[in-house]
Amino acid sequence: MVAAGEAHSRETSVLGRSTLGRPIQLIELGNPDGTPVLVVGCVHGNEPAGIGVARLLAEHPPAGIHLWVVPMLNPDGRARNTRGNARGVDLNRNFPYRWRALDGVYESGARPLSEPEARLAYRLILRIRPAVSIWFHQHLDLVWASGGEAVVARAYARASGLRYRRLPALPGSAIDWQNHALPGTTALAVELPVGSPSRAASVRYARAVAAAARVSRRTP
Ligand SMILES: [Zn+2]
């Protein structure tokens, strides 16, 4: 919760449009002098559990944080319940760090940042330079750390009750690109369990964002 007397702002805007023209919402809120934190609720359209967690954060921003929330980066994939976007591209293989041409379920696009949704996230991250970025996925039931500061991912894991796992970088992934492009910041993937989280679990996953932000470097 935002502390009494703490500076607080809230602005909802359209970050941009998906491949099929659906609006992608961005909510900026919290303390403009606080630690910059980005939360992406859903990038793979068939992994929706984080959307509710992102919306909960937007309703109850933790104190001391300047928070940007993108509840759903892949609305076309969500509408079809597919991992990829409308063109079948896995947005989490479309970022420029160690991008490789991949086919099938991990289809990585024609080239790095070929997809509008990935470009929107890329430009947002370069603009706000989040000290911590948290991307929600499913269904591995763990915190996926592959760069940045381990203490941040460990803090998220401890507060959320999810397992911490140090895992290799993946070609073209969003978190590995940020961890490479913005040294001193930490991007991590939170793999929520299968199914729809209970209200209590969603509150725990949302509160863990503040725990991760508290141990991050205040200014990258
Ligand atoms: Zn995923």
Image (tube, rainbow, N blue to C red):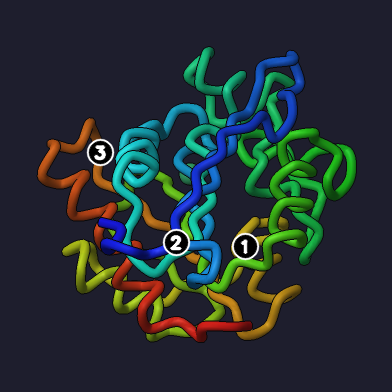
Does residue 131 lie above or below 93 as drawn? below
Name the residue rendered at 19%, 48% in the picture: 203
Helix, strand or loop for disc 1: loop
Q: Is residue 24 left or right of residue 117?
A: left
Residue 157 at x, y percent in the picture: 27, 69
Which residue occupies the foreground of this view, 152 or 93?
152
Q: Quadrant of residue 152?
A: bottom left
Amino acid type for the residue under numbered disc 3: Val
User: Which quadrant would the N terminus be assigned to in this image?
Assistant: bottom left
Callout 2, which amino acid?
A: Ala
Label 2, label 3: how far apart the Cα atoms are = 37 Å
x, y percentage for residue 143? Answer: 35, 64
At a point 76% along the width and 59% down the height, the residue shown is: 127
Q: Residues within 10 Å of mark 2 (few under 14, many from 20)?
A: some
Cα distance between the residues tagged 1 and 2: 38 Å
Residue linked to disc 2: 7
Residue that label 1 marks: 170
The residue that label 3 is drawn on is: 194
Counting residues from the start of the chain, the first of labels 3 and 1 encountered is 1
Q: Report the residue at 70% width, 65% height from top.
A: 177
Q: Residue at x 52, y 74 (%)?
A: 146
Question: Between disc 2 and disc 3, whose residue precedes?
Answer: 2
Q: Amino acid at mark 1?
A: Leu
Q: CA distance from mark 3 to mark 1?
A: 22 Å
